[in-house]
Every structure is written in C-alpha cells, then in structure tokens.
C-alpha cells in the first residue's frame, strides 16, 4: 500500500486535500484528517513512525499522538471517527486491494484433492477450476 493511496482515501472521506494535511494549519477538521492519515498509514503499511511523520512534515511524536488519539476515539465509540475510518477502509479495499489469485501447475501424478484440501485448510483459500 502506498501512502499516496492513503492520502486519496483520507481526502475522499474528509474532503481535505493532501496539501492541507501536510500543511501547517491547525484547524480541527484538518488536524483530524492528519490524525486519520497517521492511523491509517500505521495500519496499512510497514512504515516507521518517523517515515509517516516525514510524509506529513511532522515529528514522529506527532504520529504517536495521532495513533493514541484515534485509538481513544475508537474506544469511546466516537461516531464521526468510526464513519471516517469505515469510509477510508472501504475506499482502500475497493480501489487498491486487488483480488489475489494464485495459479498452481501440478505434476500429472499429483493428488489434486489433497492439494485443494491443503490450500483450503492452511490458507483459507477458495479453489476454482480455470477454463
């Protein structure tokens, strides 16, 4: 997942553009979008706190504050935060996460039923016959 995708998702959900999120404005809606960006980055990427902070021109301690704040908002069941996060996650899932398919070519003498059972049990895979 690229941070640009997360910027797009946050912008779609909050109607606040990337320039404002990375800017210096401290108005409440913009700060909330910034917090949502940090939280979503930490959830969907392997970036460090410092790297996330660099994307929004902030120190890593700001990212820690964002993570704590959004976690608290989720804990107290804040409706606005839940709606924003739901919209962001839906946007990311629909637009950027593709259906992962794996094609396996087996030797002629392979026991296909055992392979299918293994894939279904081990990876919760859905096995379909391709044409």
Image: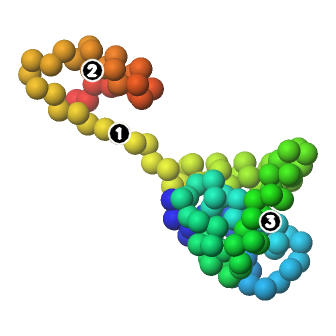
Image height check: is 120 above or below 21? above
Q: Residue at x 76, y 72 (%)?
A: 62
Q: Describe the element under mark 3 as helix, strand or loop.
A: helix
Residue 131 is situated, as x and y percent measured from the top left of the image, at 22, 29
Mark 3 and mark 1 in contact? Answer it, CB < 8 Å.
no
Mark 1–mark 2 Cα distance, whole angstroms, equals 16 Å
The residue under the point 19% across, 15% down is: 111
Question: Residue 115 has which mark?
Answer: 2
Disc 1 + disc 2, Cβ < 8 Å: no
**Mark-to-mark CA distance, 3 and 1:** 38 Å
Task: Give the quarter of the image for residue 112.
Answer: top left
Residue toward you, 33 or 41: 41
Residue 15 seen anywhere in this rendered image of the structure:
no
Q: Secondary structure at mark 1?
A: loop
Q: Is residue 104 left or right of residue 107?
A: right
Q: Which residue is mark 1?
A: 101
Q: Is residue 118 above or below residue 53?
A: above
Q: Quote the CA–CA distance across marks 3 and 2.
A: 47 Å
Residue 100: image location, x then y, percent: 40, 42
Q: Are marks 3 and 2 in contact (CB under 8 Å)?
A: no
Residue 13 lies, in percent from the top left, at: 73, 60
């Amino acid at each position: 997942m690229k941070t640009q995708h997360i910027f797009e998702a946050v912008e779609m959900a909050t109607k606040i553009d990337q320039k404002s999120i990375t800017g210096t404005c401290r108005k409440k809606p913009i700060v909330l979008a910034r917090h949502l960006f940090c939280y979503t980055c930490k959830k969907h990427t392997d970036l460090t706190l410092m790297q996330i902070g660099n994307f929004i021109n902030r120190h890593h301690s700001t990212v820690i504050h964002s993570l704590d704040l959004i976690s608290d908002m989720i804990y107290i069941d804040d409706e606005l935060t839940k709606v924003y996060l739901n919209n962001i996650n839906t946007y990311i899932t629909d637009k950027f996460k593709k259906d992962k398919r794996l094609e396996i070519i087996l030797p002629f003498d392979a026991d296909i039923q055992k392979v299918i059972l293994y894939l279904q049990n081990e990876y919760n895979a859905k096995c379909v016959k391709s044409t």
